[in-house]
C-alpha cells in the first residue's frame, strides 16, 4: 500500500510539473503553409526553400541552459531525422523574448545549408524554433529575412503580446483647409450611383484568429503553443461552407469550382452548410454549429474575430 501511495504521489508530481509548463505564443509566418503535429508546428515557405519547426516547451532537465546550448545547440530536443551534425563554429547570440527567462539563437551551416535555432527558457522548460534552409547558399536567409524577423518579434511566453492601436489621423493645415472649403456644386443631371452590393455573399473570407496546438508528455497535455494566424471561410451560392487554416484552392476564384466533394470526404469536420437569416450567418460544419454576425460590407464577426471578404485564388 505504501509503495502504491509513493507511486501515485510521483505520478501526481509529474502531472503538476507538466501542467506548469507555459505556452509559447507567436504569429504564423505570413504566406507560409502550415502543418500541425504532436511534436511541432511546421511552416513551409511558398518557394519551399525554408522550413520552420516550432517545438513547444519541454522540461530542460539537469544542466545550465546556456552551457548546454553552447555545447550541443540542444539538438537532443529535435527529432533524430531533423538533427544536424555538430557544426564547427556556430554563431551564438542572445535574443529577447517577452516573458522568457533567457533566449539564445545559434546560426550554423549544415551540409552547405544555412540553419538557425532559437532556444527559449521559462519555468524550467525550453522551447525550440528551428529554421532550416532546403537550398544551399545565403540567398534563402535574405529572401525570408523580413518574415523570420516578424516571427521572432511576435514570440512571447505565457501571455500574448499586446497589439498596438493604430495611430490617430491628424489633419495638416493643408488638409484642414481642403476640408473647410465649400463643396463644388453638383451637376444638374447627375447619374444616380449603382445600388451597393449586398453586405454578404458567396466567396472567401479571411480573418486572424488564435488557436492552441497542445503538446503532450506521457499522454498528459503539457502546455502547448498559441498561434495567431489567418483562418479562411469559403461559401458557395448553393449554401455550402468550408473552414481552413490554409488558403483554399479555388479555380478562377469561383467558389462553385471548389472541390466540395473532396473537402467533405477528407475534412468533414470543417465542411458543411450555411444559412443566412437577416444579419446572422449560421454555419454547420461537421458536429459544430457556428454563429456569425454581419457587421459591415463584406465583413462578419465570430466571437470578436473580424473576417473580411478576399479574392480567392
Image (tube, grey):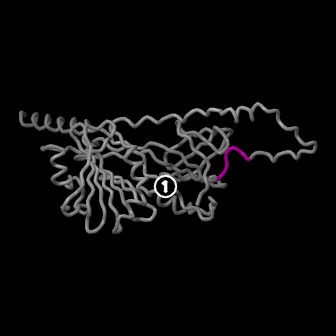
Residue on which disc 1 sits: 268
Q: Quadrant of residue 8?
A: top left
Magenta residues span 197-202
Magenta-span inclusion, residue 251: no
Q: Position of residue 139 (x, y in %)?
A: 39, 64
What is the secondary structure assignment of the residue under circle 1? Answer: helix
Give the main secondary structure, helix, strand or loop, of the magenta stretch.
Answer: loop
Q: Is residue 199 magenta?
A: yes
Give the crowd class for mark 1: few <14, some 14-19, many >=20 residues within 10 Å: some
| Residue drawn 60% across the image and 48% down it | 274
- Depth check: give the residue in front, 6 or 192: 192
Q: Which quarter of the figure is the C terminus placed in?
A: bottom right
| In the foreground, 26 or 250 | 26
On screen, residue 199 above or below 53: above
Which x, y percent locates residue 265?
49, 60
Q: Nearer the viewer, residue 306 or 9?
A: 306
Image spot of residue 9 (x, y percent):
14, 34
Q: Residue furthest front?
A: 173
**Going by the picture, which residue comes out furthest to the left?**
2
93 relative to 110, above or below: above
**Residue at (46, 36) in percent of width and height:** 163
Q: Residue at x 29, y 43 (%)?
A: 221
Residue at point 33%, 69% (across, down): 136
Looking at the rendered structure, the number of numbered marks drawn on it comes to 1
Q: In front here: 188 or 120?
A: 188
Q: Residue 16 at x, y = what percent?
A: 22, 35
Amino acid at each position: 500500500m505504501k509503495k502504491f501511495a509513493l507511486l501515485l504521489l510521483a505520478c501526481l508530481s509529474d502531472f503538476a510539473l507538466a501542467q506548469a509548463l507555459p505556452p509559447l505564443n507567436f504569429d504564423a509566418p505570413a504566406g507560409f503553409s502550415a502543418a500541425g503535429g504532436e511534436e511541432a508546428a511546421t511552416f513551409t515557405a511558398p518557394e519551399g526553400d525554408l522550413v520552420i519547426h516550432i517545438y513547444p516547451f519541454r522540461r530542460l532537465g539537469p544542466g545550465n541552459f546556456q552551457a548546454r546550448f553552447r555545447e550541443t545547440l540542444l539538438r537532443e530536443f529535435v527529432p533524430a531525422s531533423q538533427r544536424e551534425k555538430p557544426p564547427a563554429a556556430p554563431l551564438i547570440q542572445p535574443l529577447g523574448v517577452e516573458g522568457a527567462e533567457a533566449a539564445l539563437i545559434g546560426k550554423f551551416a549544415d551540409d552547405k545549408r544555412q540553419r538557425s535555432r532559437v532556444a527559449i527558457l521559462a519555468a524550467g522548460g525550453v522551447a525550440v524554433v528551428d529554421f532550416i534552409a532546403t537550398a544551399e547558399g545565403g540567398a534563402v536567409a535574405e529572401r525570408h529575412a523580413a518574415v523570420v524577423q516578424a516571427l521572432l518579434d511576435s514570440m512571447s511566453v505565457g501571455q500574448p503580446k499586446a497589439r498596438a492601436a493604430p495611430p490617430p489621423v491628424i489633419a495638416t493645415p493643408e488638409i484642414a483647409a481642403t476640408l473647410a472649403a465649400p463643396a463644388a456644386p453638383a451637376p444638374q443631371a447627375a447619374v444616380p450611383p449603382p445600388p451597393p452590393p449586398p453586405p454578404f455573399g458567396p466567396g472567401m473570407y479571411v480573418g486572424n484568429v488564435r488557436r492552441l496546438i497542445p503538446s503532450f508528455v506521457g499522454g498528459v497535455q503539457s502546455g502547448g503553443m498559441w498561434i495567431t494566424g489567418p483562418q479562411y471561410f469559403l461559401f458557395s451560392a448553393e449554401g455550402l461552407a468550408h473552414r481552413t487554416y490554409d488558403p483554399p484552392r479555388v479555380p478562377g476564384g469561383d467558389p462553385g469550382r471548389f472541390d466540395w466533394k473532396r473537402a467533405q470526404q477528407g475534412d468533414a469536420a470543417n465542411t458543411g452548410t450555411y444559412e443566412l437569416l437577416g444579419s446572422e450567418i449560421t454555419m454547420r460544419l461537421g458536429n459544430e454549429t457556428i454563429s456569425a454576425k454581419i457587421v459591415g460590407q463584406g465583413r462578419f464577426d465570430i466571437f470578436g474575430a473580424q473576417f473580411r471578404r478576399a479574392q480567392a485564388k
